[in-house]
Amino acid sequence: MKILAITACTAGIAHTYIAKEKLENAAKELGDTIKVETQGSIGVENEFTPEEIKEADVILISADIRVNKDRFKGKPVVDIPISMVMKSPKGVISKIHEKLGK
Protein backbone atom coordinates (compact mmCIF):
# COMPACT_ATOMS: atom_id res chain seq x y z
CA MET A 1 0.00 0.00 0.00
CA LYS A 2 1.21 3.51 -0.81
CA ILE A 3 0.69 5.77 2.18
CA LEU A 4 1.13 9.50 2.40
CA ALA A 5 1.19 10.73 5.98
CA ILE A 6 1.29 14.14 7.61
CA THR A 7 2.55 14.55 11.14
CA ALA A 8 2.04 17.75 13.10
CA CYS A 9 1.89 18.48 16.82
CA THR A 10 0.92 21.65 18.64
CA ALA A 11 4.52 22.71 19.31
CA GLY A 12 5.77 21.38 15.97
CA ILE A 13 8.92 19.99 17.47
CA ALA A 14 9.45 16.57 19.06
CA HIS A 15 6.24 14.61 18.44
CA THR A 16 6.05 15.70 14.80
CA TYR A 17 9.41 14.09 14.04
CA ILE A 18 9.11 11.12 16.41
CA ALA A 19 5.77 10.20 14.81
CA LYS A 20 7.36 10.50 11.35
CA GLU A 21 10.10 8.04 12.30
CA LYS A 22 7.64 5.63 13.94
CA LEU A 23 5.38 5.61 10.87
CA GLU A 24 8.31 5.07 8.51
CA ASN A 25 9.58 2.12 10.56
CA ALA A 26 6.12 0.56 10.94
CA ALA A 27 5.33 0.88 7.22
CA LYS A 28 8.65 -0.70 6.31
CA GLU A 29 7.99 -3.63 8.68
CA LEU A 30 4.52 -4.12 7.18
CA GLY A 31 5.75 -3.96 3.58
CA ASP A 32 4.17 -0.62 2.72
CA THR A 33 5.69 2.42 1.07
CA ILE A 34 5.28 5.69 2.90
CA LYS A 35 6.21 9.31 2.53
CA VAL A 36 5.77 11.56 5.54
CA GLU A 37 5.27 15.29 5.26
CA THR A 38 6.01 17.13 8.49
CA GLN A 39 4.34 20.37 9.43
CA GLY A 40 6.61 21.50 12.23
CA SER A 41 7.98 24.62 13.80
CA ILE A 42 10.19 25.25 10.76
CA GLY A 43 7.32 24.89 8.29
CA VAL A 44 6.40 22.13 5.85
CA GLU A 45 9.11 19.62 5.01
CA ASN A 46 9.00 16.78 2.48
CA GLU A 47 5.86 18.23 0.83
CA PHE A 48 3.83 15.89 -1.35
CA THR A 49 3.76 16.41 -5.10
CA PRO A 50 0.46 16.25 -7.03
CA GLU A 51 1.73 13.02 -8.64
CA GLU A 52 2.41 11.41 -5.25
CA ILE A 53 -1.07 12.35 -4.07
CA LYS A 54 -2.59 10.88 -7.24
CA GLU A 55 -0.72 7.57 -6.74
CA ALA A 56 -1.39 7.22 -3.00
CA ASP A 57 -3.80 4.61 -1.69
CA VAL A 58 -4.52 6.54 1.50
CA ILE A 59 -3.71 9.80 3.25
CA LEU A 60 -2.97 9.49 6.97
CA ILE A 61 -3.12 12.70 8.93
CA SER A 62 -1.65 12.29 12.38
CA ALA A 63 -1.97 15.73 13.88
CA ASP A 64 -3.09 17.72 16.87
CA ILE A 65 -3.48 20.88 14.79
CA ARG A 66 -5.71 21.68 11.82
CA VAL A 67 -4.32 20.39 8.52
CA ASN A 68 -5.73 21.59 5.20
CA LYS A 69 -7.17 18.58 3.34
CA ASP A 70 -8.29 20.34 0.14
CA ARG A 71 -5.51 18.80 -1.97
CA PHE A 72 -6.67 15.27 -1.06
CA LYS A 73 -10.12 15.36 -2.69
CA GLY A 74 -11.18 11.92 -3.87
CA LYS A 75 -8.66 10.09 -1.66
CA PRO A 76 -9.42 8.12 1.50
CA VAL A 77 -8.24 10.28 4.41
CA VAL A 78 -7.66 8.90 7.90
CA ASP A 79 -7.46 11.64 10.51
CA ILE A 80 -6.13 10.63 13.95
CA PRO A 81 -4.47 12.26 16.96
CA ILE A 82 -0.70 12.09 16.92
CA SER A 83 -0.80 10.21 20.25
CA MET A 84 -2.18 7.13 18.47
CA VAL A 85 0.89 6.94 16.24
CA MET A 86 3.16 7.52 19.23
CA LYS A 87 1.58 4.55 21.05
CA SER A 88 0.99 2.06 18.22
CA PRO A 89 2.21 2.97 14.74
CA LYS A 90 1.93 -0.60 13.43
CA GLY A 91 -1.57 -0.87 14.88
CA VAL A 92 -2.62 2.31 13.08
CA ILE A 93 -1.32 1.08 9.72
CA SER A 94 -2.77 -2.39 10.24
CA LYS A 95 -6.18 -0.86 10.98
CA ILE A 96 -5.96 1.16 7.75
CA HIS A 97 -5.23 -2.07 5.82
CA GLU A 98 -8.26 -3.65 7.45
CA LYS A 99 -10.58 -0.71 6.70
CA LEU A 100 -9.45 -0.34 3.08
CA GLY A 101 -9.20 -4.05 2.41
CA LYS A 102 -5.63 -3.71 1.13
Image (cartoon, grey):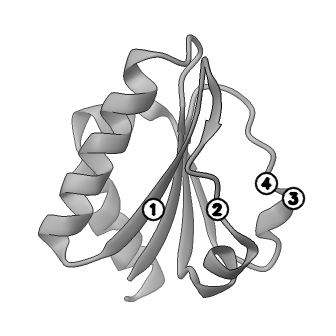
- Left or right: 14, with 79 as reference point: left
Query: Of discs 3 and 2, which sits in the foreground?
Result: 2
**Residue 70, numbered circle:** 3
2 or 1: tag closer to the N-terminus: 1
Disc 2, SS = loop
- Which is more N-terminal, label 2 or label 4? 2
Residue 100 in the image, given as x and y percentages of width and height: 47, 82
Alpha-carbon span between mark 4 and mark 2: 12 Å
Three-letter code, disc 1:
Lys
**Which residue type carries mark 4?**
Lys
Label 2 neighbourhood size at 10 Å, few (<14), some (14-19), many (20+)? some
Q: Which residue is mark 1?
A: 35
Q: CA distance from mark 2 to mark 1?
A: 8 Å
Report the Cα–Cα distance between label 3 and label 4: 4 Å
Callout 2, which amino acid?
A: Phe
Q: Secondary structure at mark 4?
A: loop
Q: Residue furthest left?
A: 29
The image's mark for residue 56 is none
Taking 40 as reference, is 51 above or below it? Answer: below
Q: Is residue 98 left or right of residue 48?
A: left
* Quadrant in which residue 85 is drawn: top left
Which of the two marks, 4 or 2, is nearer to us in this view?
2
